[in-house]
Amino acid sequence: MPLDILLTILFWTLYPIGCIITVTVGKVPDTPESLLFEEKMSYKRIISCSHCGTTGHNKAGCPVYKRYIERRREIDPDSYLVRRYDAQKAKKAASAKNRRCTYCGERGHNRAGCSRLKDAIESFRVINAKYRSAFVDKLVNHGFGPGSMIQAEDTVWLVTGIDWNRVNIANKGQMMMFIVDVADDQNRLSKGVLDNRYWSRTRLPRNVTGYEFGVDYNIVVRTNENRIRSTVPPEFLDGTLGLHKLFKNKKSNLYSMKDMYGAFTQEFDPEAFDLGIW
Ligand SMILES: [Zn+2]
Ligand SMILES: [Zn+2]
């Protein structure tokens, strides 16, 4: 068989395997740390200036370049650089006037400059802080959190941690509690090498939420208040943990005031959320 045909066959045989490996390896474990990292990554991009070389702005926003242009203007207001600078500024101002805010739909500003979005985020933070603090109280009342053990049928699970990012009033009932099957993972548990990739997750059971829907299991070993409270990140309780990410998620209805007909009618309303915990 000619070498090039052999290589082609090999390539198409191995290519799908390569894809599978890439997908598996590329999957970030869903831990609080990785979520935090992701959150930071998604809105902190580093830009650098081609004029002065520092980071944090580009040439169009460079204070050094601006001073340079102003000096040029005094010497020769008609110089090419001065005219180009002014033209670019005017163009930017015109397009800013014309753009439409993806949050409220108005023209003349974007999301970063949207006062309605800013108010909505703050208003959500306040109500979410209330929900979260009630959520923690509920855990404390039931002795439920890291260190407690739960039982469903004849399987016993140890609660190893809580994915605090997943606890918020806009998305209740998420799988936020990390658990390990005590029998299955005993070996690794005893060595202390249990990797969070092997953790399973669950949500609050009916006997904790008090609702008739949801999962059902019993808490067989309670944990103490101190252990629960010491794992709560402060930015969880003040409502800021994951806050901006929630409003950046295009699939969330917090993302925009746009209704199902495409009109921007859905003004943020904190009254629309109820404080029931599940
Ligand atoms: Zn600069
Ligand atoms: Zn707006």
Image (cartoon, rainbow, N blue to C red):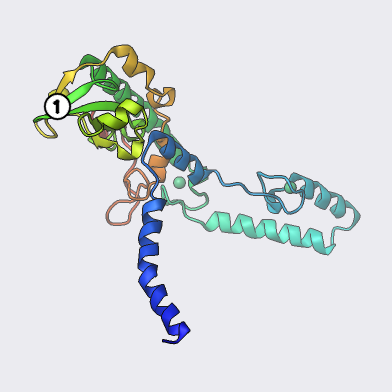
Viewer-side residue, 112 vs 235: 235
Q: What is the three-letter code of the residue carrying label 1?
A: Gln
Viewer-side residue, 3 vs 40: 3
Viewer-side residue, 183 vs 133: 183
Using the image, determine if residue 6 lies above or below residue 161: below
Does residue 172 show up? Answer: no
Count of labels shown? 1
Does residue 267 show up? Answer: yes
Viewer-side residue, 80 vs 63: 63
Give the x, y percent position of residue 206.
13, 28
Using the image, determine if residue 245 lies above or below residue 160: below
Provide the secondary structure element on which disc 1 rests: strand
At 78% from the left and 46% from the top, the residue drawn is 64
- Which residue is outermost to the right? 75
At 75% from the left and 45% from the top, the residue drawn is 63
- Quadrant position of the N terminus in the picture: bottom left
At 33% from the left and 54% from the top, the residue drawn is 263
| Quadrant assignment, res 29 | top left
- Quadrant position of the C terminus in the picture: top left
Give the x, y percent position of residue 264.
35, 50
Instruction: Give the side of residue 263 with respect to residue 4, left or right.
Output: left
The residue carrying pointer 1 sits among few (fewer than 14), some (14 to 19) or many (20 or more) residues within 10 Å by Cα, namely some
Give the x, y percent position of residue 209.
17, 26
Residue that mark 1 sits on: 151
At 20% from the left and 30% from the top, the residue drawn is 183
| Quadrant assignment, res 75 | bottom right
- Which residue is outermost to the bottom? 2
- Which residue is outermost to the front? 1
Using the image, determine if residue 43 lies above or below residue 141: below
- Callout 1: CB less than 8 Å from ligand 2: no
